[in-house]
Image: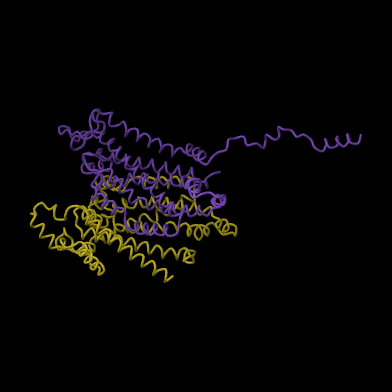
Amino acid sequence: MLKYILKRLIISLITIWLLATVSFFLLRSLPGNPFQTEVLLSAEVQQRMISYYGLDRPLYEQYFTYLGNLVQGDLGYSLKYVNRSVNSIIAESFPVSAELGLRALAFALPIGLALGVVAARRRGKAADYMSVLVAVIGISVPSFIMGTLLQYGFSVKLGWFPVAQWKGWEYTVLPSIAMGLGLLATLTRLMRASMLEVTTQDYIKTARAKGLNERQIVWSHQLRNAMLPIVTVLGPLVANVLMGTFVVEQIFAIPGLGMHFVQSVQSLDYTMALGLTVFFGAFLVAANFIVDLVYGVIDPRIRVAD
Amino acid sequence: MNSTSEAKSANKKFNFINKAELQHEAIVRPSLSFWKDAMNRLVKNKVAMLGLSIIVLTIVMAIVGPWLTPYSYNQTNLSNINAPVSSTHWFGTDTLGRDLWARIWMGARVSLAVGIIGAIIPSLLGMVIGGISGYFGGKTDMIIMRITDIGMCVPQLIYVILIMIYFGSGPLPIILAFALTGWMGAARNIRGLVLQLKEREFVLASRALGASSWRLIFKHLIPNTLSILIVSMTMAIPSAIFYEAYLSFIGIGIKPPMSSWGQLVNSGISVFQIYPSQLFIPAALISLIMLSFNLFGDGLRDAFDPKLRN
């Protein structure tokens, strides 16, 4: 087990390094320079900015400086926000995105899984059709449309919740639902399919044959096995949700990470875009790593195989 | 004398049977192939057929829609901006006085084309790469799988944004971005399937009879993975449509005066508190077409799933 963890850890580190390298050169190959868009800067000032940030030095030199800083956990200074380090921007925005993500998860995870289980248990009955309907609609309505509709209905028309911004509990309700619905739908579909798959397995027949009652069969045989595919997708899913989705943050004017990410790539804020990419990548890698470990706990068969 | 009696008794031992009885054993109905059976069940699935008819209707409207109105999708008319739904402008006009009927069906062409092509290309690419990886195994497999391992650790949005900024915005860069990022998931799925199939008895039997790799791949492996691939391709279409809309919505996909549904939602949002129809029509269409593809895909999956056969 220790050897397995170590091996996975090394692969994870290599992945992050490759990600940092590829993104570094990809970003640098984009046409233009980060100071071009500022209308007031003359060519001379632009040149001075470029040399101030060291962007005129050879690319490989910049790359090694960048890697050296990265190893120490320093992501550099933003080229757009004067005098602010990428670390401080992440420290400020990430908790907001993470809180929104956690709220969306807290809303979607229990309801989604429960709907999936109920749908599979009552297959072909009204409860099944209702769950499938909720799931299909949740998947089909994009989050940005759902967010706008919720905002229009519950804030503008009914006035139940504030329209936008992030100042307290009542501000979090609509964005969490807008983000959570798609997630809920995905989880419902996965859980339903997974439960149905498990129901026809031989060990369920065995469990029934040896006289276990229905509750024991569902809880300790069906659910435990049906959870496996869910756990696999849960890692990347949670990472994605915690990092915030750009559109929901944009619609509700929430100061999260998503906004910074798209803006930084568009305005060629190299250090910011790179810092966020590496942060996000590392987060995703970590989530996958944890999933793999959890997998071993849930499914002893996998531990044996390694 | 003796011989004739023997012949008589032999005649008693072996009676002619009634030929009509043999007919009971014959297979009366034509044998049903896998594909025919799946088609039968798909056609009986009302929800899936409803999805399919909405898809077909939308495609037809995307082709003929822009021609039904005298206005063009990019012709502005500043004396008639934000017009409501009326008999001249069937969906009204936008903030620059462009006819929204024309813009919506032009947008449908872009959204559907990007969605369908953007789903099929990465799936086919993934099928080829995953098939090679699973079939040949060994070092090839290891290298391909490590590439996808690492590639899939990076959120798709990062690649797509980088590609879009590099190649500019428009339908072709979006499709390219999908092709470059989407094959990895498909390749992993197909590889898993091929790995399973490769060990099955019918493949072994075919190999024992001297079949070449070529024959094994095209006669056994591909036909057996095809149904799963078709389902996953159908399911990839709504997510490609969603992704295009998402990119256009955040302003890096399709840009005006070109039109796509995501771009229309994006411009509708800025005025939706005053002119809600400018947002609701494209928003409803995106949701409806994604719903239809999802329903149709579900129907296909159920039709192909041998476990659901009776």
Query: Residue B275 at what x, y percent from top left?
Result: 22, 38
Q: Note the chain letter of the yellow one.
A: A
Residue A156 position (above or below residue B97): below
Q: Residue furthest bottom?
A: A2
Instruction: Name the residue rendered at 57%, 52% in the picture.
Output: B208
Q: Quadrant of the N terminus of chain A?
A: bottom left
Query: Residue A3 at what x, y percent from top left?
Result: 42, 71
Residue A53 position (above or below residue B194): below
Query: Is A1 or B217 nearer to us in this picture?
Result: B217
Q: Residue furthest right?
A: B1
Q: Is residue B127 left or right of residue A245?
A: right
Instruction: Name the residue rendered at 12%, 53% in the picture.
Output: A38
Query: Is B73 or A168 nearer to us in this picture?
Result: B73
Q: Note the chain letter of the purple one.
A: B
Residue A138 in view in this figure:
no
Query: Residue A194 at what x, y percent from top left?
Result: 46, 53
Q: Quadrant of residue A87?
A: bottom left
Q: Quadrant of residue B271?
A: top left
Please give the count of numbered marks on the rendered protein.
Answer: 0
Q: Is residue A110 left or right of residue A97?
A: right
Residue B163 in view in this figure:
yes
Q: Is residue B277 left or right of residue A124?
A: left
Residue A298 position (above or below residue A146): below
